[in-house]
Image (tube, coloured by chain):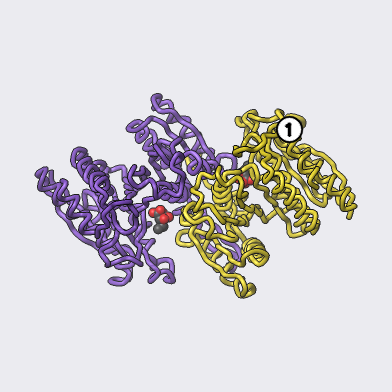
Chain colours: A yellow, B purple
Amino acid sequence: MKKHIVLLPGDGIGPEILASSVAILKTIAKKFNHQFTFEEHLIGGAAIDAVNNPLPQETLDAAKKADAILLGAVGGPKWDHNPSELRPERGLLAIRKALDLYANLRPVKGFEKLLHASPLKEDIIKGSDLLIVRELTGGLYFGRPSERRNDGQDVVDTLAYSKAEIERIVKKGFESAQLRRKKLTSVDKANVLESSKLWREVVEEQSQFYPDVEVEHLLVDAAAMHLITHPSHFDVIVTENMFGDILSDEASVLTGSLGMLPSASLAESGVGLYEPAHGSAPDIAGQNIANPIAMILSSAMMLRYSFDLNAEAELIEKAVEACINQGFHTADLQVKNGTKVSTTEMTDAMINFI
Amino acid sequence: MKKHIVLLPGDGIGPEILASSVAILKTIAKKFNHQFTFEEHLIGGAAIDAVNNPLPQETLDAAKKADAILLGAVGGPKWDHNPSELRPERGLLAIRKALDLYANLRPVKGFEKLLHASPLKEDIIKGSDLLIVRELTGGLYFGRPSERRNDGQDVVDTLAYSKAEIERIVKKGFESAQLRRKKLTSVDKANVLESSKLWREVVEEQSQFYPDVEVEHLLVDAAAMHLITHPSHFDVIVTENMFGDILSDEASVLTGSLGMLPSASLAESGVGLYEPAHGSAPDIAGQNIANPIAMILSSAMMLRYSFDLNAEAELIEKAVEACINQGFHTADLQVKNGTKVSTTEMTDAMINFI
Ligand SMILES: CC(C)[C@H](C(=O)O)[C@@H](O)C(=O)O
Ligand SMILES: CC(C)[C@H](C(=O)O)[C@@H](O)C(=O)O
């Protein structure tokens, strides 16, 4: 198989962990006789520094032609006081919108060997394995008007959705549930928001086409509670953009190893952008100590979702598990009787396994 | 002191726990020579059943004349499929708006003896003692337009704030921090929302008037993570309505005893509505097993915030602590070597202490 992958290293630890992923993908390509070609472009703070634009046209053009995109991370204190248009996050928001990456998939699953690092008690976190399907290109993030009014005395943002936008993400939620334990939790605030009422209607409508999936509705405030008290209750959670932002970050710390969590942002075309759930960690950048696993698992998601290469994806996931079970860990984790390794050592261990 | 208190029992366990509070308040009145008068009115599902309106005019008129309001809880499956205007929550939203109860104060503090019930590991939850100051009458909850468009094909909700609305809640946040450990965390999504940018500006502006308070800004997604990983990091959190709804419910489960958490919703006039942080628990209603403590602590907040009766409030809080330290607990809690008691037995134990 021939695939062209655009690499967006971004800021902080982005370049290091992306380099790890590329090394792994090259190993996979050799082993399975694929041809992966790579093309690197600027995004985020790095792009602001170089060309004063968090998403240069060149990057966008390349991304549009790619079979898939791997993104390291964007952001850092260096750009925190820039005006909005010149902030690294704008690059991320802009590429999501431009490529219509409407479905953000964030799996949260602990590794037995690392669960001791969870902030939750073991009997609570044990057995949790959930997937958050977050709408990524609508809602408060992109609704207009979003502006000051009356000489700056008033301000509005707009939570806007079309029924079609809700339908496609809800379908993605149902389809994701069908591939897993067939349970879908739709999260909204239907007792307050008109948009949530439409959301709930769409979920009800769509549920007839997925009779094998059990559906429940949960208010967002209750969902924020249940994630902590009963994380293993959930299989797939589907929700709108802002609720998904909050709940997926909340969920990401439950297993105690944020550095292990991948994400995929998918378009209807099948193209996807894959990035770790964690941020750019500028404080540890350039020291070869970052945990590359979230990024590596993101590239496994790419193989599965964009290229349909399931055996290859599984092999990467197995390599990760094997390394962890052998006690290898980067500095962000503590493992009793484990072996602390650098970013590149961890990567090499996985390559050896593969 | 003479004070007139409007009682809104509402639904589920509301009436029982409110009765407990009234019994305690009568004991306090006798002991300290105050004159508390009580007047009961309908709200929520009970009001829908009786007069087909979740907030009858009579209730609102009485509430407007009261020195303070005690509310049990509203809601239940019985009314879940009613049209929006005839849902119990509407009564709550309407009374908040009508009385301009803009500041919702939700303290979250564990009891040493009950911390074992926390979903968090003990070393993480230990020492946590935080207060969430949530804006309660603006934002997405009340912004207009909030409607379907284009034949139901589109939907919008509006997140609207005036600068004045932001200022008064931010001030309340600073003032609350001054009365505590002098640390304020302002939560927003300033990397995405225009309203959050204004919010952050107001916090910066106001901070000069509270030089003794240390301020930090945190994005709402990061806040959702830190509440779990570092709950003891926080003193006062101030945030807008929807973020506050989600974060305060998230925070409410951290200590493992939601049945102990009170809340206050305050107007600029000093009038306030006091209610437990938990819901109406219809499944255990009418069995004399509900935990009355969140409601009782809410009435202590009333004494403190609306009547300035600090000694009286403290005595109630001490009574609660004493009963818990003696091992008394209701069915929602498990206490090793404790004594399981009913709602009324718990109340009587406190009255004895007082
Ligand atoms: C960087 C930020 C704009 C972004 C978001 O809020 O979507 C991030 O938090 C995420 O979840 O991917
Ligand atoms: C009942 C509901 C409308 C309400 C809210 O969202 O404000 C409740 O969740 C609360 O937090 O008091």
Most foreground residue, A214 or A112: A112
| Count of all numbered marks drawn on residues in the image | 1
For the N terminus of chain B, the quadrant is top left
| Dot 1: chain letter | A
Q: Residue at 38% of width from left, 57% of height from top? A: B93
Q: Disc 1 marks which amino acid? A: Ala
Q: Residue at 53% of width from left, 52% of height from top? A: A125
Q: Against A105, is B164 above or below?
A: above
Q: In the current view of this chain or complex, which residue is farthest to the front? A: A337
Most foreground residue, B226 or B352: B352
Most foreground residue, A12 or B258: B258
- Residue designated by label 1: A46
For label 1, count other residues whose C-alpha is less than 10 Å away and answer few (under 14), some (14-19) or many (20+): many
Q: Residue at 33% of width from left, 67% of height from top? A: B45
Most foreground residue, A284 or B341: B341
Q: Against B307, is B286 above or below?
A: below
Q: Position of residue A281 (x, y in %)?
A: 64, 34
Q: Position of residue B128 (x, y in %)?
A: 40, 39
> Is residue A201 something that shows in the picture?
yes
> Is residue B188 something that shows in the picture?
no
